[in-house]
Image (cartoon, coloured by chain):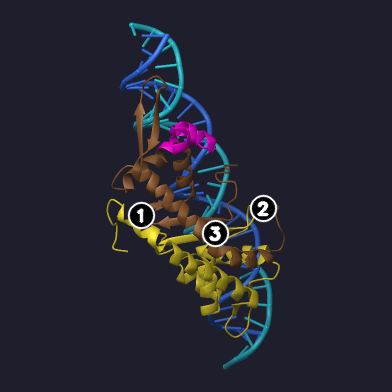
Chain colours: A yellow, B brown, C cyan, D blue
Amino acid sequence: MTGATPDALLRLRIVFGTEAMLGPGKADLLELIAETGSISAAGRRMGMSYKRAWSLVEVMNAIFRAPLVVSSRGGAKGGGAALTDEGVAVLAAYRRVEAQLAEVAAEDVATLTAMLRDIPDGK
Amino acid sequence: MTGATPDALLRLRIVFGTEAMLGPGKADLLELIAETGSISAAGRRMGMSYKRAWSLVEVMNAIFRAPLVVSSRGGAKGGGAALTDEGVAVLAAYRRVEAQLAEVAAEDVATLTAMLRDIPDGK
DNA sequence: CGGTGATATGTCCGGTGAAACATATCGATT
DNA sequence: AATCGATATGTTTCACCGGACATATCACCG
């Protein structure tokens, strides 16, 4: 039961190059980092190992000119992480596209759903 | 180098249940089956084994009430496959959503692209 | 009736990505 | 200086997906 992402009806991935891409996983992670102020806490909430969460952050920071996440070690609470302005902007852009997608896709998705054999779980 | 899909800027996946989903791979496959009249030819074009192509078709036919692809064995040319009306409809719906997505996402995608470190290949 | 070419399926095997485990490091606070 | 919690990173193991093979089957046509 990895249960990575609950189950969004529409999953969007923005592919930049061969390696660089932004999907639901990284977006959710960004959001949770902003919310929790910690990479590990964010990863925990998503049910992924700290290692994985951290490596995703590493990738994101690598593909963008400016880092999306800044982190600090040590200190009273051990450390922490936060989104930079760029991180906030990237997350916002992704969410915006997601929302607009949901809007324009609604009709066709309804059509497709109606053609399905059975509804696995009343989503 | 599987190189399934060259590199679409926007990859869309419509998730129905836990197993049932429709993404670029299945959509492209449907399109190529319609075009070639053959599962194996379609798979070949996409650089995938016949087995894989066939299994994708199997899944699609399973999750929808009516099969999207009908196939026949034997005959002068050995056999063949074609899309049903439902198959055509599903493909059309998917492509429509894709197109609309590209439209509404253009601006934000441009923003994100501008924030990237380097352009891998002038896509 | 045998050749043909594509569908239909099964098995095996290897590579890949992720999980699991293991540390090392840092620095404000106490 | 000792503690604490989170960052930072390496290594090893493992499960799973997909590719490569291997066949069986079918029906039209020459």
Q: Quadrant of residue B119?
A: bottom right
- Closest to the observer: B11 or A43? B11
For label 2, the SS is: loop
Q: Chain of mark 2?
A: B
Is B46 contained in the magenta span?
yes
The residue labelled by disc 1 is A112
- In this picture, is A37 found above or below B67? below
Q: CA distance from mark 2 to mark 3?
A: 15 Å
Q: Chain of mark 1?
A: A
Badge 1 amino acid: Leu
Tag 2–tag 1 contact (CB < 8 Å): no
To the question of a shared chain for discs 1 and 3, the answer is no
Say left or right for B107 vs B36. Answer: right
Return the disc, 2 or 3, that comes first in the chain's sequence: 3
Question: How far across and how far down the image is residue B41, in percent?
Answer: 49, 32
Is A103 contained in the magenta span?
no
> Residue drawn at (40%, 29%), measured in percent from left and top?
B80
* Res. B102 mark: 3
Q: Chain of mark 3?
A: B
Q: CA distance from mark 2 to mark 1?
A: 31 Å
